[in-house]
Amino acid sequence: MGQCDGVVLNFPIVAWKKRLIEPLVVAVLTKLRSKRLTVVLHEWASLDWKRRLVLLPVIKLADAILFSAPEIRDEWLQGAGANRARLGLIPIPPNLLPSSSISDAPAAHSIRALRRDGTKIIGQFGSIYPKKNCAELFAIAAELRKAGQDIAVAFIGSFIKAMDNVEEEFHAQVRQHGLEGRVLVTGYIAEDNHVFAALRELDVVCYKFTEGLTSRRGSVLAAAMSGRCVVTNAPRDASSLAHHDLFRAMIANGNIRLAATDADPCTMASEIGLAFESKAGMLDFEGQLDDLWKRIVERLDAVQK
């Protein structure tokens, strides 16, 4: 810390109970050494109140707070009151990147086993928790089946252990929509190239977010970089992606297809049907990521001055 000009903390932390005190200690030490403290905040109102209580003292010490989406900034302003910190938006990068090496991992084999003659596989990448709206994907799959499509569903990720009955409710929804034997959960995958091998076994990736797409959804960026089309619902405010050039480029290029924010399962299913037939061209992801990191550094520099 003595050799740096400032400290940047990213919140929330997944294993937050193991890090109850450490962020506050780091923040206090940063201030005692007269260094600048910057917090990057990716969630706020959707966090459990206990997590917000732990984070609040650290964030209040920050000289600057950067938000990964304007929606999170608005939640902070509505709930946290006045704050002397400088505020800004920062475009977050994908949470993992494809490699040049081709992997044929066990998860990819498991997804491939779902495929029979004519089967289309839709799915998601990321941890499974209530706000991911898995039930929406089941309803969309059911609509596609009503339309005569042979559909299977794959979730590339694992359940987040919480106080609610996430896994039990997940399997109940599978039964409710008549998808027994057609749904796979891979479990956590540690290697990035194994994740991308699994993503490439899907025909379409689909997310239906309650709030619509927001720029903090790094899993959407990663899924789109696999070469598979991502169908999701649009942001409530179209300007909310204005600070994120990679999201905007992917949408313009067709790597991400947007349905209406409040699209019902039938509308989402129709959009997926169109995605089955279309092939988006590959972007120059290396160049796009270089530009993205330049914007990230620019935003950090701007709030340090």
Image (cartoon, rainbow, N blue to C red):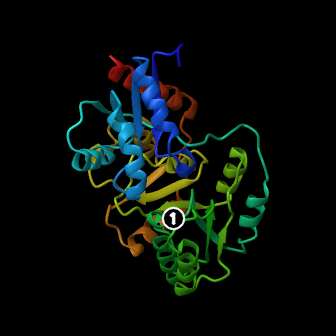
Residue that sits furthest to the top in the current view: 3
Given residues 287 and 40, the one toward you in this image is 40
Residue 113 placement, left or right of 80 = right
Secondary structure of residue under mark 1: loop
Q: Position of residue 144 (x, y in %)?
A: 51, 76
- Compared to residue 209, the image places residue 1 above or below, namely above
Residue at horizontal 33 percent and vertical 47 percent from the top: 72
Residue 43 appears anywhere in the view: no
- The amino acid type, in three-letter code, at marker 1 is Tyr
Left of 88 or right of it: where is 6?
Answer: right
The residue at 57%/62% (across/down) is: 160
What x and y, as percent, mark residue 200? 66, 54
Q: Residues within 10 Å of mark 1 (few under 14, many from 20)?
A: some
> Front-most of 123 and 156?
156
Q: Is residue 56 above or below residue 49?
A: above
Residue identified by numbered label 1: 129
Q: Quadrant of residue 27?
A: top left
Looking at the picture, does residue 173 appear above or below residue 209?
below
Q: How many marks?
A: 1
Q: Position of residue 279 (x, y in %)?
A: 55, 52
Q: Quick check: can you spot residue 169?
A: yes
Is residue 198 found left or right of 95 in the rendered image?
right
Q: Position of residue 2 (x, y in %)?
A: 52, 14
Q: Pick the residue in front: 48 or 41.
A: 48
Q: Residue at x 60, y 65 (%)?
A: 159
Can you name the residue that lies furthest to the left here? 82
Of residue 164 and residue 268, the one placed in the foreground of this image is 164
At 61% across and 61% down in the image, what residue appears?
203
Look at the image and tell me in which quarter the C terminus lies: top left
